[in-house]
Image (cartoon, helix red, strand yellow):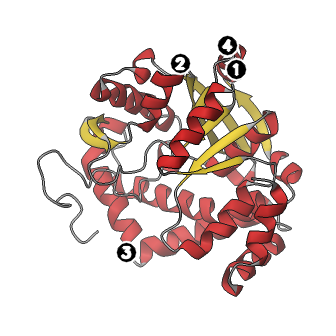
Amino acid sequence: MPVSIVVSELRAAPLKVRAAAALMRLASRLPLSWLHALGAAVGRLAGLLRTREWRVARRNHELVGSALGVTDRDAFVRGVLVETGKNLTELAKVWGADPQRALALIRDVHGREHLDAAKAQGRGVIVAAPHLGCWELLNLWLCAQGPLAILYRVPQHAEWEALLRDARGKLGATQVRADAAGVRELLRCLKQGMALGILPDQRAKGGEGEFAPFFGLPCKSMTLLSRLAEKTDATVVFGFAERLPRGGGFDLHFLPAEPDIASADRERAVAALHRGIEACVRRAPTQYQWTYKRYSAQPGVEGDQVYGRG
């Protein structure tokens, strides 16, 4: 969709949405180190108040802390909450600032050869971007490299969709809703040789998705990425933007995916997807979205019996 149309959507949005966009533009003038300090303070406060995010992060450590190699639960939870706060406040720099100012925060790109090799094959590229680090900055950088399609879900409160589309559409990304028509659009984009960005680690809804081990425990994830790779022969690469200490900016990382990620055996494909996400998470464990109820769905279990009131 043309950028001008996306902008008009934001202008027609409710006042609170337009006010949030204006606040981000104002906050984008602050140094990243200040924004990260503010986010860290928000995260520490969440820990002191024993919020839902604190409870979920704590439970996730109980479930997979040993598999992650992180033994100090309290330090892990504090780190997760601090990084979660930074993820919130740094959006002002990515969504509120001019795209070139946001891209200037990137210090280095590791593993770019994997992305370049995938593009050189001319069959379309799927960038699997876990909820790790600053995934919105990764989207922006990918869009600056060439035509990019982004798969997204409509927010729970639909009035915020205009803000999301405005923020992600500044460099002309093709934004595709996660519905049946959207899947057809994604197939078209990939067959034209475009790159596609997908957040692959959201809980699959209803009967969708497949279970496979994730840090040793059964976890349900989407099969859409694997189906797209199988049908289009697109190459899959993992990517994330690592947040550097003390407001120092970000490093991008790209890792190759296993061939099995495009397997017609969906359980085998999701297992390969999970191993790829694990490889990313191990590089920056506390920057993963451990405040998310990743294991709430379990095989043969009705409802969420893992997190309780968390």
Nearer the N terminus, badge 2 or badge 3?
3
Badge 2 is on which residue? 233
Nearer the N terminus, badge 1 or badge 3?
3
Badge 3 is on which residue? 50
Q: From the viewer's perspective, is residue 302 above or below residue 211? A: below
Q: Which mark is residue 290?
A: none
Find residue 303 and report its image quarter: bottom left
Residue 244 or residue 270, whichever sits in front: 270
Question: For mark 2, does the 10 Å Cα neighbourhood hold few (<14), some (14 to 19), or many (20 or more) residues?
Answer: some
Give the residue type at disc 3.
Answer: Arg
- Could you say where residue 262 lies in the image, as x and y percent from the top left? 43, 22
- Could you say where residue 153 lies in the image, as x and y percent from the top left? 52, 57
- At a point 66% along the width and 70% down the height, the residue shown is 38
Q: Nearer the viewer, mark 2 or mark 4?
A: 2
Badge 4 is on which residue? 121
Badge 1 is on which residue? 119
Give the residue type at disc 1.
Answer: Lys
Nearer the N terminus, badge 1 or badge 2?
1
- Could you say where residue 40 lies in the image, as x and y percent from the top left? 60, 65
Are the residues at dot 1 and dot 4 in contact (C-beta closer than 8 Å)?
yes
Give the residue type at disc 2.
Answer: Asp
